[in-house]
Image (cartoon, rainbow, N blue to C red):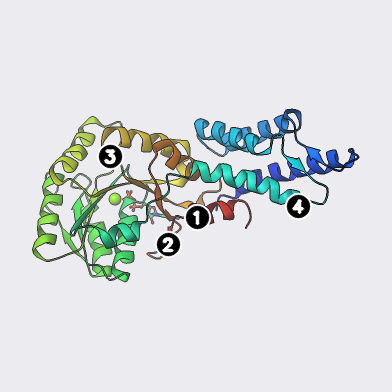
Amino acid sequence: MFERLKNKLRRFSKVVEEKIIEKGKATLSGETVLDEKDLSESLEELEIALLESDTALAVVEELSSTVKANLLGKKVKRGTNTAEIVKDALKDALLKILSPNNLNFDEFVESGDKPLNITFVGINGTGKTTTIAKVANRLLSAGHSVVIASADTYRAGATEQIEEHASRLGVKVIKHQYGADPAAVVYDAVKYAKANRIDVVLADTAGRMHTSVNLMEQLKKICRVTNPDMVVFVDEAIAGNDAVERAKRFDELIGIDATILTKADIDDKGGAAISIAHSTSKPIIFLGTGQSYENLEKFDANSFVERLLGG
Ligand SMILES: Nc1nc2c(ncn2[C@@H]2O[C@H](COP(=O)(O)OP(=O)(O)O)[C@@H](O)[C@H]2O)c(=O)[nH]1
Ligand SMILES: [Mg+2]
C-alpha cells in the first residue's frame, strides 16, 4: 500500500541526511546549519515525486513549504540522529496536511441521536455498495442495529447486489421499485428505523457522475428531504487526483461530511490519501483495504504517517 509515496519520502530523508552529514564533516565545530541551497534541490525532487504520486498541487506546495520551514536554519550537532530530524520535519508537515482527520466515526455513532441517517455518495464502481456492507458489519459488531436503504433505483441490479450483502449480514433492506424516487426510499428507511428502534440507516445511492446534473439534483433532494446526519463520499484511492477533484465537486454541490477511500490495498501511489482531506477540509474516516467485510481500516492520521515514514 502506498509504496511509491513511501519510497519517495524515504529517498528525500536519505538525501537530506547525507547532506547534513557531509556538511558536518566540513565544519570544525561539527555543527551543521541547513541553508536554502542545501534543501532546494531535494525539495524540488520531493515536489515532483509527490506530483507524480498524484498528490494535489496545493498539498504538494504546503508540504514542501512546511518541510522547508522545519529544516531551514536548523542546527544539527555532530552525533545527533539526523534521520530522526528529517523524519520529524516530514511527520509534522504530513500531520498538518492531515489535520482535518479528527472525526471518530465510532464515537459519532455511539453518541448521536438515533436513528442516524448516514448517506453514501460517489460515482459508480468505486466500491460504495461494498463499503456500506463493510460499515454495516462494523456497526453490527459494535452492537448497533442497522437498516439499509437501497436508494440506487437507477441502475438495474443495484438492489439485488445490496440485498445479497444484507442477507449475509442479517440486515433488512428498504427498497422501492426500479426508477422510483430515491429520496422516498431513504425517507421510508428512516421511518422504518424510528418505528423499529434501529440505530443506523445506511443509504446506498446511485453512482452519480459528478457531471450529471439530473442525478446530482436527485442527490440534493435526498439530502433536503431526509437531512442525513452524515454524508459520506466514497471514492477509490487508485483514482488519485480524479478522486480529489470529485470529492471537491460533491462537497460543493451537496456538502460532504467525510470520505472513505477504497482500494487502498491496490493503490501504490498514495497521493489521494494525503490530498483528499486537505482539499475538502473533511476527514477520511476509513480506508477500504480489500474485498471482504473485515477490510475496512479506521483512518488514523498518526499511524498513517508512521506507516508512510517507515515506523
Ligand atoms: N481491492 C479492493 N476492491 C474493492 C474494495 N472496495 C470495493 N472493491 C471492489 O470494487 C468493485 C466495485 O464495488 P461496488 O461496491 O459494486 O461499487 P459501487 O458501484 O460504487 O457500489 C467490486 O468488485 C468490489 O469488490 C477495496 O477496498 N479493495
Ligand atoms: Mg453500488
Please give the residue where the numbered disc 3 appears in the rendered image. 208
The residue singled out by tag 1 in the image is 265
Looking at the picture, how far across and down is residue 135, in whole percent?
A: 32, 60
Labels 1 and 4 touching (C-beta < 8 A): no
Which quadrant would the C terminus be assigned to in this image?
bottom right
**Along the line of sight, the residue nearer the viewer: 79 or 296:** 79
Res. 15 visible in picture: no
- Mark 1 secondary-structure assignment: helix
Disc 2 to disc 4, how far (Cα)? Answer: 37 Å
Question: Which residue is drawn at the image coordinates 22% and 36% (left, top)?
Answer: 215
Q: Is mark 2 within 8 Å of ligand 1?
A: yes
Dot 3 and dot 4 residues touching (CB under 8 Å): no
Q: Would you say the beta carbon of the disc 1 residue lies within 8 angstroms of ligand 1?
A: yes
Q: Which mark is residue 295?
A: 2
Q: Earlier in the sequence, mark 1 or mark 4?
A: 4
Disc 3 residue type (three-letter): Arg
Q: Is residue 108 left or right of residue 304?
A: left
Question: Under tag 4, what secondary structure?
Answer: loop
| Label 1 Cα crowd, 10 Å radius (few <14 / some 14-19 / many 20+) | some
Amino acid type of the residue that numbered disc 4 sits on in the rendered structure: Asn
> Which residue is the site of mark 4?
81
